[in-house]
C-alpha cells in the first residue's frame, strides 16, 4: 500500500532543491510572504462578501453596532460630542416627558361608529332583597369591544327616467310622443362593470396592500362574485389612464421643487420576446420638496441614464437646484448640465454609512470609529429638530427648521467633517495607516472620499437632508410588493403601476386614506372641469361633505 501523501505546494517546495545562496533564499521568503498576504486579503474579501450575502438573505436589515464595540471609543465620543456653545440655538428648557401609562389597553377612537347593546338585570333580580321594593337604575358600566364587519358587495342600479308628452300636437304630427331620457353620468371607465368603489378597492389592494390579483380574485369569490384577474388588470390600466391628468399635474409640481430626492429599484417584467422569462425593468421615485409635496414614480425598461435625463429635462434652467441621490453614474450628465439645468449633486450619508458598516467584519476597529463619527453628524440633526420643537410656535423669535439646521451644521457639523476627513485619509496605508486600498474597508473609505464634495453640500442649506432615506422609504412599497406579485406583466403594466404608486404614495405622504381618495376622484374625474383639476391633487383634496339626514 502506498503511503505517499497528496502533493501540495508546500510539500513540493520541501522536496525541491532549495537555493544555497542566502540572497536567493531571502528573495524566495519575500515572495512566499507576499503570496501569503495576498491570500489573506483574498480570503478576507471573500469572507466579507459571504457575510453580506448571508445577512441580506437571512439576517436583520437594521445597521446597528454592538454596544460593547462603541464602548471602546467612549473617550473619543466624549471629546467629539461636546457641542460648541451656541446660546441662541440652545433649546429652551422643557417639562419632563410624562411617564407612559403602562401597557394597558388603549382607548378606541371616539369617531368610530358605535352600536349600543344594553344588558339588563333579569326581572327576578330587580326587587331589593331587603324590602322587596323595585330597585332603580342609578348608572351604567360600559365595556368597549372592537368588532369587524366584512366588506359587502352591492349592485348599483343607475335608473334613468324617461319623459314623453302624449298631448303635444307636434308629437302627433311626427307619429308618436317626444321622449327624453336623462343623460347617463360620465364614468372613468365607459361601459365598465366596476363602480368607483370597486375600482378603488382593486387598486388599493394591489398597489397599497400588495395583494396579487389572483389572491384578490379568490377573496371576491368568497363574496359571491366571479371576476377574472385579467379583468381587474384591465380595470387598473383604464383607471390609471383616467387618472393620468392628475399624475401629470403631480409631475409638474415635483419639477417646480428646489430640492428633489430620487432613487430607483429593479422589478421583473415578463419578456414577450422570450416567453416564460423575465427581464429587468426599473421604477424611479422623485420626491418634491415641502413647497411641492408630491411623490412621483416613473417606469423605464432599463437603468440607462435616459430615464432621469428625460424626467429632469430643463429642471433648474431658471436657477440653482439640488438633486439628492446615490452615486449612480447615470446622474453625472444631469450634474454637468446636459439636461439643461443647473443641478447640484447632494450625496447620501446613509449610503456612505452602509459602505462602512458592511466592511466591519474585516476591520472592526476602523469601522466602529468611522461609524461613531457619522453618528455624531446625525446627532447634530437631532439637536436641530429638538431646538425647533422646543421654540414657541409663534412670535418674532420663532425660526424655521431650515434656519436652525444650517446654523447648527455650520457651527458643529462642519468642524467634525474636517476632522473626519483627516482621520479617513490617515487610515490609508499610503498615509501610514493600516487599511489597504483593495480591502473592503479601503473601498469604503475610497467611496466616502470620492463622494466627499457631494456629501458635505447638505451643510450649506437647511432645506437639504443629510441622507436620501426619504426616497428609499418611498421605494419600499415596490420592494414589498414585488415579493408578492413577483413581476409586472409588461412594460405597459409598469407604466400603469407608476401612475397608481404615485397617487397612493402622495396620499400616504399627506395622511389621506387612499381608498376614500380614489373612490371619490374616480367618480368625479370624467366630469371635473380641467381648469379646476388641481383641486383633485391628494394634498388639496377635500373629503366630500356628507349631506345631513332629513328629519323624520
Image (cartoon, helix red, strand yellow):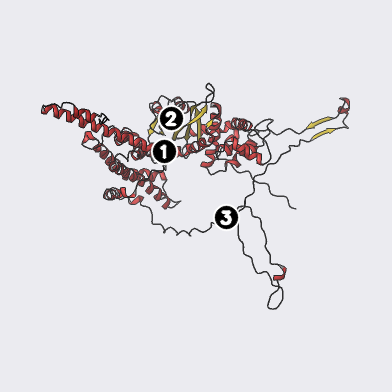
Question: Which residue in the structure is indicated by mark 1?
Answer: 56
**Quick check: 513 left or right of 2?**
right
| Secondary structure at numbered mark 3 | loop
- Residue 347 pos. (x, y %): 37, 35
Whole-Å distance between the Cαs marked 1 and 2? 38 Å
The residues tagged by marks 3 and 1 sit, at their Cα atoms, a distance apart of: 39 Å
Q: Residues within 10 Å of mark 3 (few under 14, many from 20)?
A: few
Picture coordinates of residue 184, whole percent (x, y): 72, 33
Tell which tag, 3 or 1, sits nearer the viewer: 1
- Relative side of 477 to 29, left or right: right
Proximity of marks 3 and 1: CB atoms separated by less than 8 Å: no
Marks 3 and 2 sit apart, C-alpha to C-alpha, by 48 Å
Residue 513, above or below 182: below
Image coords of residue 550 (percent x, y):
73, 50
Q: Nearer the viewer, mark 1 or mark 2?
A: 1
> Quick one: label 3 or label 1, which is nearer the N terminus?
1
Precedes in sequence: disc 3 or disc 2: 3
Image point (67%, 33%), residue name: 187
Q: Are marks 3 and 2 in contact (CB under 8 Å)?
A: no
How crowded is the residue under tag 2: few (<14 C-alpha within 10 Å), some, or many (20+)?
A: many
Q: Which residue is mark 2?
A: 316
* Residue labelled with disc 3: 108
Amino acid at each position: 500500500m502506498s503511503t505517499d501523501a497528496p502533493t501540495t505546494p508546500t510539500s513540493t517546495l520541501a522536496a525541491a532543491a532549495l537555493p544555497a545562496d542566502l540572497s536567493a533564499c531571502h528573495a524566495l521568503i519575500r515572495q512566499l510572504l507576499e503570496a501569503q498576504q495576498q491570500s489573506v486579503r483574498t480570503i478576507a474579501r471573500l469572507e466579507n462578501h459571504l457575510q453580506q450575502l448571508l445577512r441580506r438573505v437571512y439576517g436583520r436589515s437594521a445597521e446597528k453596532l454592538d454596544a460593547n464595540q462603541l464602548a471602546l471609543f467612549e473617550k473619543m465620543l466624549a471629546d467629539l460630542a461636546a457641542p460648541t456653545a451656541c446660546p441662541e440655538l440652545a433649546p429652551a428648557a422643557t417639562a419632563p416627558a410624562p411617564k407612559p401609562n403602562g401597557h394597558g389597553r388603549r382607548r378606541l377612537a371616539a369617531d368610530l361608529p358605535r352600536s349600543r347593546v344594553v344588558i339588563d338585570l333579569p326581572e327576578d333580580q330587580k326587587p331589593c332583597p331587603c324590602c322587596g321594593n323595585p330597585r332603580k337604575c342609578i348608572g351604567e358600566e360600559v365595556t368597549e369591544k372592537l368588532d369587524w364587519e366584512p366588506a359587502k358587495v352591492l349592485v348599483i342600479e343607475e335608473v334613468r327616467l324617461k319623459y314623453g308628452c302624449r298631448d303635444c300636437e307636434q308629437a302627433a304630427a311626427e307619429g308618436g310622443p317626444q321622449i327624453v331620457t336623462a343623460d347617463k353620468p360620465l364614468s372613468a371607465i365607459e361601459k365598465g362593470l366596476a363602480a368607483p368603489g370597486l375600482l378603488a378597492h382593486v387598486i388599493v389592494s394591489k398597489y397599497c396592500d400588495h395583494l396579487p390579483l389572483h389572491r384578490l380574485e379568490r377573496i371576491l369569490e368568497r363574496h359571491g362574485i366571479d371576476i377574472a384577474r385579467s379583468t381587474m388588470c384591465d380595470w387598473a390600466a383604464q383607471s390609471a389612464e383616467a387618472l393620468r391628468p392628475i399624475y401629470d399635474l403631480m409631475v409638474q409640481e415635483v419639477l417646480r421643487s428646489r430640492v428633489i430626492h430620487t432613487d430607483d429599484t429593479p422589478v421583473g417584467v415578463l419578456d414577450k420576446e422570450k416567453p416564460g422569462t423575465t427581464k429587468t425593468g426599473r421604477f424611479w421615485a422623485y420626491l418634491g420638496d415641502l413647497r411641492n409635496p408630491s411623490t412621483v414614480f416613473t417606469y423605464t425598461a432599463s437603468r440607462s441614464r435616459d430615464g432621469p435625463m428625460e424626467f429632469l429635462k430643463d429642471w433648474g434652467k431658471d436657477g440653482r437646484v439640488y438633486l439628492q441621490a446615490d452615486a449612480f453614474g447615470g446622474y453625472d450628465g444631469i450634474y454637468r448640465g446636459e439636461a439643461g439645468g443647473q443641478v447640484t449633486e447632494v450625496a447620501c450619508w446613509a449610503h456612505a454609512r452602509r459602505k462602512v458598516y458592511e466592511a466591519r467584519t474585516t476591520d472592526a476597529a476602523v469601522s466602529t470609529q468611522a461609524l461613531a463619527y457619522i453618528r455624531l453628524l446625525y446627532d447634530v440633526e437631532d439637536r436641530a429638530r429638538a431646538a425647533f420643537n422646543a421654540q414657541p410656535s409663534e412670535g418674532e423669535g420663532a425660526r424655521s427648521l431650515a434656519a436652525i439646521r444650517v446654523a447648527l451644521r455650520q457651527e458643529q457639523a462642519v468642524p467634525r467633517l474636517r476632522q473626519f476627513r483627516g482621520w479617513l485619509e490617515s487610515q490609508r496605508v499610503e498615509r501610514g495607516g493600516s487599511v489597504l486600498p483593495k480591502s473592503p474597508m479601503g473601498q469604503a473609505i475610497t467611496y466616502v472620499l470620492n463622494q466627499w464634495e457631494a456629501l458635505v453640500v447638505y451643510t450649506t442649506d437647511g432645506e437639504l437632508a443629510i441622507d436620501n432615506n426619504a426616497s428609499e422609504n418611498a421605494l419600499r412599497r415596490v420592494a414589498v410588493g414585488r415579493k408578492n406579485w413577483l413581476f409586472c406583466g409588461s412594460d405597459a403594466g409598469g407604466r400603469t403601476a407608476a401612475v397608481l404608486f404615485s397617487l397612493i404614495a402622495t396620499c400616504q405622504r399627506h395622511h389621506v386614506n387612499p381608498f376614500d381618495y380614489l373612490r371619490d376622484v374616480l367618480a368625479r374625474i370624467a366630469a371635473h372641469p380641467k381648469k379646476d383639476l388641481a383641486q383633485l391633487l391628494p394634498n388639496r383634496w377635500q373629503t366630500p361633505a356628507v349631506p345631513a339626514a332629513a328629519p323624520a
